[in-house]
Image (cartoon, helix red, strand yellow):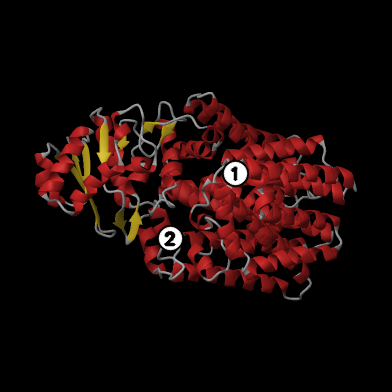
Amino acid sequence: MKEYIIGFLFVITLSLLFYSFGSVIINKEKSDGYKLMVGYLIYSFFIGLSGMIIQFFNIPWKIYFYIVILWMIGIVLFIVYQVIIKHKKIFYDGIKEYIKNNYFLFIVTILLMAVFMLTYNALWFGNHLDDGYYITKIADLPYVKDPYTFNYSTGFQDKFSLERILNTHELELSVYVYLLRMSPSLFTRFFMSGLHYFVFANSLSAFAYAILKKINKDFNYYLVQFVPTILLLFSFNENFIRYFNIAFFFDSNQFANAIYFGSSVVRVMSFIFLLTPFIESKKVDFKMILCVVGISVVLMSKSSIALPLIILISLFYVITTLVFMNKKYLSAILLFGLFIVVSVCASLFTDVSRMQNCVHDILLVNSHSILLLTSYAIIILSYLLKNKYVNRMSTILLLLLVFTQTPILSGLYYATSIYAFVSCRGLTLINYTCIMYAFILIVYFTSKIRFSQVLYSVICLCLFATSVFSYHLAGGSLFFDKHKISQYSLGHALNVIAHNPEFMPETTIELGYTLQNYAEDNNKELNVIMTRLILSDGAAHALPIILRTYCPSEKIHIISALYRYENPSTTKFKDFKEEDQSLFEAYTVNPSQENYEKLKNMVDTYDINCLVMPNNSYDADVKNLGYTLLKCVTNDFNDVTHYIYVR
């Protein structure tokens, strides 16, 4: 309970910091959502740029910790100065008016968090093993001597990677976890999810207000808060969406169960972050370029998948501004022609086949999606408004759709994506943005209806109910099967979270703490092997990938996590293969004499001095290998037992 109180207070404080920071910088004519978004972006720029410098020059983590604290203190002092000396107001029209115009953003955030609470099976699997990098990094950074070239899941040193050096999201969160002395899984999975949902809801309302104000300067500001209702659509179970051909949003499951990822910020908000501040602009000037660079730094600090999106969105904004605002058609044609030449050359002279195949599979589904086709149709019909600001925005989205999915014309996008999954995640952003933009236009056209507020509330309730139902109907499997869907007990999901309040199996946490204490108390390196997947609470749990979240000591090496990563070339485990791991698992399934001998040879060859066994039926064999029982970790609710042996 103490951690929950601390977490709620921290998230509320950080949200208020973002809003207050933006409020004293931005003029009072801007929306409340815009103020929070700007505060978030400027704060993230300072934190992210500092982190990039720290990681690139391999400066100790502790220095970054103090830099973040100083930035936070400095921003608070700046706000206080602006309020007391400059007589700026944080809530220009009072808190009561703020609540009146923004209460629905809180409702949407709460509903999204309610859906998140149903996704324990994805969390237990480590979000398709990605948590093995992200959450363990957040947990390990303060305790590792050379933290920026480290494999956080295995406990070995890793190679230098520029894209990882540029990403500072986990570095930032590691400061908060260390500062609050909070469980890494609880902080990231629960509290950062809530914070991100709230930032997204505010940012979408800011984007919506900027668009709606350009269509009708007298638009009812009160109704803007209902636009983020559409975010509930993105929380639908991914298998449900694909099975019923609603659409194919690549990795859309991460909106519901991994919104705390830095890449989730990029995948949902890149377009809105990059363009909302410039919707009213009529020309591209130096100040705008500086702002775009700053926002790009923020996006790159969250995830390097932002790069191709930054390039295309910025380029298309310039081209459409030349056409719709400046009437400089020749300049627009020349720039557009140059872009096409570069894209075609990239398609012809670089290997983009993997990206094309991945995008093609998505396009096959989405070309029959009523949801997306309707959104595209609304975007096209928006030209009937004959509003140059709307025309510019609609044209940018249509250009993005064409030049990310048309084979010969998408070369630049594919080339800068580098990986197929990056190009597919970019399509998710574009389609999400098309849906959000179309819904903004729907709100505009329905705003004159007498009971429009009731209509939007009903839409919100329907989307929430459908999202919850989607997990009941299709949440039983983490992998898509076009032939069937697996049902899921929502009551059981909530019961699991109630029994595992840190959003991690309790047995995993205790196992990690036990290894940590033993290694540190005995000043001993542990080479640990265990089963790669176990069953916990009826769901597959990727134990070795996530374990170092709770045993961050460099003395602990999780050998069973090596299968997902490159082997450490400078250690004796450079030759450890998946087949070696399979020898351990074969013995646990069938403890025959033959399998015992193979296990003995493997643990002796690699000096495996810690075994985590699933029960005590192997006790005699394991003790014959020279191990002694350190501890038995058990939990009756999730029916998991770990017998920890060391030698």
Q: Mark 2 points at which residue?
A: 479
Please say if 35 is above or below 375.
above
Q: Nearer the viewer, residue 20 or 451?
A: 451
Q: What residue type is labelled 1?
A: Ser
Q: Which of 576 and 454 is in front in this view?
A: 576
Q: What residue type is labelled 2?
A: Phe
Looking at the rendered structure, the secondary structure element under dot 1 is: helix
x and y, in percent, of residue 624 in the image: 9, 40
Q: Quadrant of the C terminus?
A: top left
Q: Which residue is depicted at the point 60% across and 39% down?
A: 300
Q: Which residue lies furthest to the bottom in this view?
A: 450
Looking at the rendered structure, the secondary structure element under dot 2 is: loop
* Crowding near the residue tagged with mark 2, few <14, some 14–19, many ≥20 C-alpha atoms within 10 Å: few
Q: Which residue lies furthest to the right in this view?
A: 327
Q: Is residue 587 visible?
A: yes
Q: Horizontal placement of 4 versus 641: left or right?
A: right
x and y, in percent, of residue 122 in the image: 42, 57
**From mark 1 to mark 2, how far is it between C-alphas?**
24 Å
* Residue 417 numbered mark, or none: 1
Q: Which residue is depicted at the point 72% across and 54% down?
A: 207
